[in-house]
Amino acid sequence: MSDTFDLIVVGGGPGGYVAALRASQLGMSVALVESTHFGGVCLNWGCIPTKALLRSSEIHHLLHELGTFGLSADNISFDLSKIVGRSRSIARRMGGGIAHLLKKAKVTTFDGRAKLAGRSGEAHQVAITKDGADVTTIKAPHVILATGARGRQLPGLETDGTLIWGAREAMTPKELPKRLLVIGSGAIGIEFASFYRNMGSEVTIAEVADRILIAEDPEISAAARKAFEKQGMTIITSAKVGPLNKSETEVSTTIESPTGKIDLTVDRVICAVGIVGNVEDLGLEGTKVQVDRTHIVTDGFCRTGEPGVYAIGDVAGAPWLAHKASHEAILCVEKIAGRSPQPLHPLNIPGCTYSRPQIASVGLSEEKAIAAGHKVKVGRFPFIANGKAVAMGETDGMVKTVFDATSGELLGAHMIGAEVTEMIQGYVITRTGELTEAELIETVFPHPTISETMHEATLAAFDGPLHI
């Protein structure tokens, strides 16, 4: 086996394995180094298995709403071990699929941890170890670091795997906690809160900011809070969570907020309080690679300060999204291959939260658009005025559009409700293609679909919606 390649990719997550596949398509010899499982956190412990859990919880919720649809069922119950087992089997299946794709593409894979180990002429050397033992050293003129990130640990809120959970424990519960505290209300925290509430847990969310889902438009954030509280969640914002005091079976704490102090005792705590890049032990010392708050600094083509070394995905900073990592992988590899890809525009990256209701957005919020100096036109359309949403029994939701009043540019789109994570791509295409309200208004939306709310929200920003 040769020890010299055109490209070495460190990390086999949604950034790394896509980079390896694309490089192979473009005729490069590629080595991919992965220490655990292909697919990274996303496939094995994030995006995919959580969606399997959420699907089970959605069905559980629907089973208790059968009367609405003229149906009935007796003795509704669930087997948590089978729900978790299905989630894990899907992750294994998808991981096996990636291994097959890499083999088919003739990517050389190495099982171990990789570390930059200096140069050999024009090539970077990468040392590979497994369980502390040397495996081999390989070299290539180009190295892509795609090592991902992990959950942040805060003093006094450290996970212990038993009573205080991180994402992995939250995805593999042995039993359903009757009382659950979720610390943090980003997408990860909200999705776990939604899963456990749908399954019957009493859920409290504590968020240090003054509103949940801080990355979303404030209007959507408020609508989400209203929906979650209607489902029975307790939400505390501007919250300061005191030390977590553990007994053998439960956790107690005090939460301070502008409304006062709350003494809370729960069976389990989920901490979802931020992301830390995996930059340790990569051999960055002595290179020109810069690290800022645990994330590698890159330019629009994923290049670091060290010639021939690139970084993509979560290790390169926010937004921490699998689709951002995969897109960066492709543009980075194509740049290496001498093609002319376009840099990734951060405001064209959609964000999705797969709770009930779902939340999705792209571009600027109304607040940020105004702060950026735009004169805006804003359109809103509620799901309750959409025939398909009414027929589905999914009337809680809305679409909000933010346009530049002068140019007609779609500055941002913000959605809450059923299936909006599938619909947001229409607005992403609008932004990527630099389309205006004119093209959206002239677009024919199929009837009956929930996507018609997108058309109506565009009309609402200009001449007015038709159905409200």
Image (tube, grey):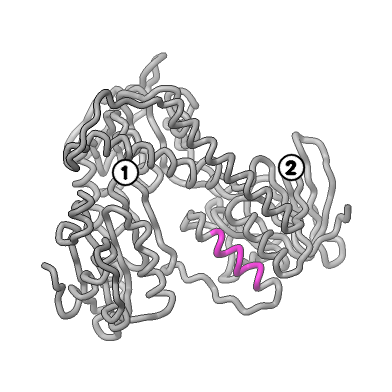
Q: Which residue is mark 2?
A: 112
Say if the magenta span includes residue 333.
yes
Q: Secondary structure at mark 1?
A: loop
What span is in magenta? 325-334
Q: Say above or below: 29 vs 439.
A: above
In the rendered image, residue 85, in percent from the top left (x then y), is placed at 50, 31
257 displayed left or right of 346: left
Residue 223 appears in the rendering: no
In the rendered image, residue 27, in percent from the top left (x then y), is placed at 76, 69
Residue in the foreground of this view, choosing between 75 and 268: 75
Q: State the residue at coordinates (36%, 19%).
A: 250
Q: Main secondary structure of the magenta part?
A: helix
Among the two numbered marks 2 and 1 on one chain, the one whose residue lies closer to the N terminus: 2
**What's the CA distance linking mark 2 and mark 1?**
38 Å
Say if the magenta span includes residue 225.
no
101 displayed left or right of 182: right
- Name which quarter of the figure residue 119 lies in: bottom right
Q: State the residue at coordinates (23%, 34%).
A: 64
70 displayed left or right of 443: left
Q: Which mark is residue 208?
A: 1
Give the amino acid at mark 1.
Val
- Name which quarter of the figure residue 329 lies in: bottom right
